[in-house]
Image: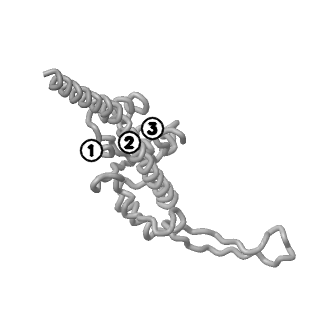
């Protein structure tokens, strides 16, 4: 009987040790996965911002949808004035200026950039970023703004639900949004991201 009780106690201790270990490891795994997903998604949001700023430079406004943004990246061109010669060097001969066209995609992103994936939230099954534009008034000046965003419930789908609720609550307290976003349609913010460090 004594050996049976000892065996039961050993099993109970092992089970308890496993649950204690798991209770420590669960938040560690959550934080590691959250950091990984945030890092990649922040870069995607930066790419969206780069594309939107280029779009506005050419079109004088931001676009609220990815179809027009991606079309612009694929087919748009920047006009660049190339100067041959030096105006301060009279011996060099006449200064020649010519306008050349450079593809938007080639000038903004690395070669073979997967531009069609710009709309998709990383680590999801084709979930798309939400994107809006607005015109706000700041000091009697009309300002065009845009916002691209994704909720943690989408980006961190599949992670521990209770830890996700806790993380959302902390994000709302810190940055007033339970997810990642760049720009704002509520106030001009110079297209800043809500992840800090910018």
Question: Could you tell me which secondary element the residue under label 2 belongs to?
Answer: helix
Q: Is residue 92 left or right of residue 45?
A: right
- From the image, which quarter does the C terminus lie in? top right
- Residue sitting nearer the eye, 16 or 68: 16
Residue 185 visible in the snapshot = no
- Residue depth check, mark 1 versus mark 3: number of the one nearer the observer: 1
Question: Could you tell me which secondary element the residue under label 1 belongs to?
Answer: loop
Residue 126, position as x, y percentages in the image: 29, 56
Determine which residue is flagged by label 2: 34
CA distance separating discs 1 and 3: 33 Å
Category of crowding for the residue at label 1, using alpha-carbon neighbours closer than 10 angstroms: few (below 14), some (14–19), many (at least 20)? few
Give the color scheme: rainbow, by chain, secondary structure or one colour. Answer: one colour
Is 166 above or below relative to 90?
Answer: above
Category of crowding for the residue at label 2, using alpha-carbon neighbours closer than 10 angstroms: few (below 14), some (14–19), many (at least 20)? some
- Residue sitting nearer the eye, 117 or 90: 117
- Residue sitting nearer the eye, 71 or 58: 71
Determine which residue is flagged by label 1: 158
Q: Earlier in the sequence, mark 1 or mark 3?
A: 1
Q: Residue furthest bottom?
A: 93
- Residue depth check, mark 3 versus mark 2: number of the one nearer the observer: 2
Determine which residue is flagged by label 3: 187
């Amino acid at each position: 009987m004594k050996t049976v009780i000892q065996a039961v106690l050993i099993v109970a201790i092992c089970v308890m040790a496993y649950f204690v270990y798991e209770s420590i490891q669960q938040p560690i795994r959550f934080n590691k996965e959250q950091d990984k997903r945030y890092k990649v998604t922040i870069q995607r949001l930066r790419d969206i911002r780069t594309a939107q700023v280029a779009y506005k430079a050419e079109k004088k406004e931001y676009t609220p949808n990815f179809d027009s943004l991606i079309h612009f990246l694929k087919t748009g061109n920047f006009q660049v004035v190339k100067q041959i010669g030096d105006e301060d060097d009279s011996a060099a001969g006449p200064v020649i200026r010519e306008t050349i066209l450079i593809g938007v995609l080639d000038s903004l992103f690395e070669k073979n950039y997967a531009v069609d994936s710009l709309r998709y939230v990383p680590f999801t099954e084709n979930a798309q970023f939400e994107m809006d534009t607005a015109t706000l008034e700041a000091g009697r000046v009309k300002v065009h703004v845009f916002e691209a965003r994704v909720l943690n419930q989408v980006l961190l789908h599949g992670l521990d639900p209770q830890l996700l609720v806790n993380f959302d609550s902390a994000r709302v307290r810190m940055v007033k949004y339970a997810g990642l976003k760049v720009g704002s349609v509520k106030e001009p913010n110079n297209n800043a991201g809500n992840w800090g460090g910018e």
